Image (cartoon, grey):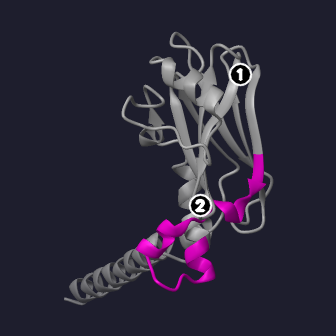
Amino acid sequence: MKKLFLLLFFLTVFFACRETNQSGEKDKQNNNTNTTGNETESALLLPKETIAKFHFSDSTTEDIFKLVADGFDPLRSNITLTISNSKGELLYSESFKSDQLIDDKIFDMTQNPTEEDKKKYAVRKMKTFFESNSFSQPAIPDEDEFTDEYSDRAIWDDIKSDKSAVGFYYLLGAVNGKSIAYSKKQKKVVVYFTCC
């Protein structure tokens, strides 16, 4: 009887210790999977670069579209937009402040954006800068009319006459929208429309 009592005692202690250890491991696992603020913190950092490939200057090979940030602060970094052909030749380059990623669409999210809202928006915009809906072919549809305050007539006519030209539109800040295309005649990227 004494042996049975000791056996039951040891088994109770064994299973009690084992259950305590397992619950401690579960707590550790839960602590590892809980949101700790690091996810939020990384959502507020600019990616170092965003890269996409599209047919732009040539219908047979893809060009490389790239945004490169010199820092991680979404409101205080410098960003360079480049387009290079498949041979690595630079076709287009423009540099701007990262806060220019913020446009009026931020007000669709909130009427009074905080600094954190602005940072999140800038990060999201950099990650989605080269979405396919920013590209069009032909670059200028037949129904679009020339407006001399937003374009140059010779460039407009050149791009509009080329039905294979691909247009890329991007917006910096609230009023600096640009439409660019590769001019086969001039053998370079041109801005064929710029407006608010």
Asked if one can make out residue 9 in the rendered structure from this viewpoint, the answer is yes
Quarter location, residue 45:
bottom right
Residues 26 and 181: in front is: 181
Around disc 1, counting alpha carbons within 10 Å, would you say few (fewer than 14), some (14 to 19), or many (20 or more)?
A: few
Residues 142 and 114: in front is: 142
Task: Determine whether 195 is above or below 132 in the image.
Answer: below
Around disc 2, counting alpha carbons within 10 Å, would you say few (fewer than 14), some (14 to 19), or many (20 or more)?
A: many
Task: Determine whether 91 is above or below 179 in the image.
Answer: above
Residues 121 and 106: in front is: 106
Q: Position of residue 119 (x, y in %)?
A: 62, 70
Q: Position of residue 183 (x, y in %)?
A: 63, 20
> Which amino acid does the dot numbered 2 rest on?
Val
Quadrant of the frame with the N terminus: bottom left
Asked if one can make out residue 25 in the rendered structure from this viewpoint, the answer is no
Give the mark toward the camera: 1 or 2: 1
> Which amino acid does the dot numbered 1 rest on?
Lys
- Which residue is the extreme one toward the left? 1
Task: Determine whether 33 is above or below 149 in the image.
Answer: below
Q: CA distance from mark 1 to mark 2?
A: 30 Å
Residue that label 1 marks:
188
Residue that label 2 marks:
123
SS for callout 1:
strand
Magenta-colored stretch includes residue 10: no
Quarter location, residue 93:
top right
Q: Position of residue 101 (x, y in %)?
A: 63, 60
Q: Earlier in the sequence, mark 1 or mark 2?
A: 2
- The magenta region covers 95-118
73 to the left or right of 182? right
SS for callout 2:
helix
Residue visible at 62% across and 48% down in the picture:
149
Q: Position of residue 185 (x, y in %)?
A: 65, 13
